[in-house]
Image (spheres, rainbow, N blue to C red):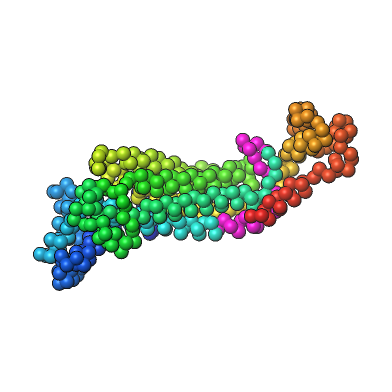
């Protein structure tokens, strides 16, 4: 991950130092098991716990020679302990340590993302209530549709993000597994019971279908859940970008003191954070494809997952964490222009009444096709002549024959406002 998009604590979580500390944590948990089984003496255990150290620079030099990162790590730790160091990595294969440590790190990363996401939801929640009774023009295909509650618009994105966070947390729990079952998962040196004992002390459950590695569909599911969350963040950011456009101008991303939007045009106030969120979502989704490619490996495993996962899982979790940080800044700085919202409603010229009047005609006994033709003709003519649609309805002889004057007067924005209030009252 490039420094620009790497925030704490994810930066530390995916550092080499933390990786080696987590590897050592797994190794020492197995030493506790060996002591419990009376294979390692109390004195040896004390010396191992007290002396076990590693040096990232020495590991790097050893790996250059050995061409194996775990052997380089084990060699370095064993040297730091002395004779008792022979018990480090006893009965284990590399993936027992690497995959279990990876699972622990993924757990921590996902917890941090969910925690940050809950903070984002708390920031969005006040926007829902504060704007529950504000009517804004709803759009389909980018074209005026009918008025809706602005609070409900925020509620839609709130609900989607909450759903994605719940899904990510459920996926995290599903992937909360490790393995100490050896070369092809047959528990030759560490029995299933002992494996469970160690892993539960680490906060994990044993994967009952592990081979040399943990099942990669679990990490692919994590990756897919992250891609979905990134897409939902993009969905919200894209809406802000569109409403920020000069021609719409109803909601704008905040613009800080001293901020500049363009090197050439001083007047520009661009939705830069929202655009960055949308751009990074593309990277997160693309990485999920690479992670899915690790599900199908040769027999009990090959090494193609290793190089992939050194990029996919660190970068995906770190990018989603960063996107969450950006979205919190966007939400806290949002500027809602009530005047522009009202202007756009008025600019619609009342054409959003077309569906309501269509259904009222059907209730009066008209066929749907005939009613549609009449309302469409009046609506399109009103739009072309820039005439108010309700004025055209009230002036049309056919409409005046169908609707008594009192009914024609009842066509007002209050219908949409009342329904918006009723809808929001149930949320």
Magenta span has 366? no
Q: Is residue 339 above or below residue 49?
A: above
Return the x and y of residue 112 as percentages of the image width and height. 42, 58
Magenta region includes residue 141: yes
Q: Position of residue 361 (x, y in %)?
A: 80, 35
Q: Residue furthest left?
A: 83
Residue at 83% from the left image edge and 44% from the top image edge: 410
Q: Residue at image x 78%, y 29%?
A: 367
- Tell me which segment is drawn in magenta: 123-144
Residue 100, picture quadrant? bottom left
Residue 35 screen position, x and y as percent: 19, 67
The foreground one among 314 and 300 is 300
Q: Is residue 70 above or below residue 198?
A: above
Q: Is residue 233 left or right of residue 390?
A: left
Q: Position of residue 408 (x, y in %)?
A: 85, 40
Q: Indicate left or right for 384 with 207 as reference.
A: right
* Residue 259 appears in the picture as rendered: no
Residue located 82% across and 33% down the image: 365
The C terminus appears in which quarter of the rendering? bottom right
Q: Image check: 207 left or right of 258? A: left
Residue drawn at the location 68% of the way across and 51% of the way down: 423
Residues 25 and 234: in front is 25
Nearest the viewer among 215 and 373 is 215
């Amino acid at each position: 991950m490039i420094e620009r998009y790497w925030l704490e604590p994810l930066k530390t979580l995916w550092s080499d130092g933390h990786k080696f500390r987590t590897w050592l944590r797994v190794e020492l948990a197995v030493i506790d098991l060996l002591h419990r089984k009376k294979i390692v003496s109390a004195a040896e255990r004390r010396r191992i716990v007290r002396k076990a150290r590693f040096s990232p620079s020495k590991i790097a030099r050893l790996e250059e020679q050995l061409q194996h990162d775990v052997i380089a790590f084990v060699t370095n730790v064993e040297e730091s302990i002395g004779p008792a160091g022979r018990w480090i990595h006893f009965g284990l294969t590399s993936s027992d340590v690497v995959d279990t440590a990876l699972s622990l790190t993924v757990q921590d990363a996902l917890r941090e993302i969910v925690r940050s996401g809950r903070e984002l939801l708390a920031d969005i929640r006040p926007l829902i209530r504060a704007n529950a009774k504000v009517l804004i023009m709803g759009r389909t295909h980018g074209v005026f549709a009918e008025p809706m509650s602005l609070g409900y618009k925020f509620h839609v994105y709130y609900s989607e993000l909450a759903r994605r966070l719940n899904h990510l947390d459920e996926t995290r729990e599903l992937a909360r597994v490790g393995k100490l079952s050896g070369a092809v998962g047959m528990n030759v040196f560490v029995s299933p019971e002992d494996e469970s004992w160690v892993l539960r002390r680490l906060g994990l459950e044993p994967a009952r279908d592990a081979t040399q590695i943990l099942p990669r569909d679990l990490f692919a599911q994590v990756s897919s859940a992250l891609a979905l969350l990134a897409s939902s963040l993009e969905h919200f950011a894209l809406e802000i970008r569109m409403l920020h456009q000069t021609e719409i101008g109803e909601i704008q991303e905040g613009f800080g003191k001293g901020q500049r939007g363009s090197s050439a045009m001083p007047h520009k106030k661009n939705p830069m954070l929202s655009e960055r969120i949308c751009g990074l979502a593309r990277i997160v989704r693309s990485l999920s494809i690479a992670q899915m490619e690790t599900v199908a490996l040769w027999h009990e495993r090959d090494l193609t997952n290793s190089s992939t996962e050194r990029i996919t899982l660190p970068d995906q979790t770190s990018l989603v964490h960063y996107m969450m940080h950006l979205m919190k800044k966007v939400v806290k700085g949002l500027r809602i222009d009530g005047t522009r919202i009202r202007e756009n409603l008025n600019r619609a010229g009342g054409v959003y009444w077309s569906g309501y009047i269509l259904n009222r005609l059907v209730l009066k006994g008209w066929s749907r096709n005939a009613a549609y033709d009449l309302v469409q003709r009046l609506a399109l003519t009103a739009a072309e002549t820039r005439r108010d649609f309700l004025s055209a309805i009230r002036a049309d002889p056919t409409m005046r024959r169908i609707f008594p004057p009192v009914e024609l007067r009842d066509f007002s924005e209050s219908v949409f406002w009342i329904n918006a209030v009723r809808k929001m009252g149930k949320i």
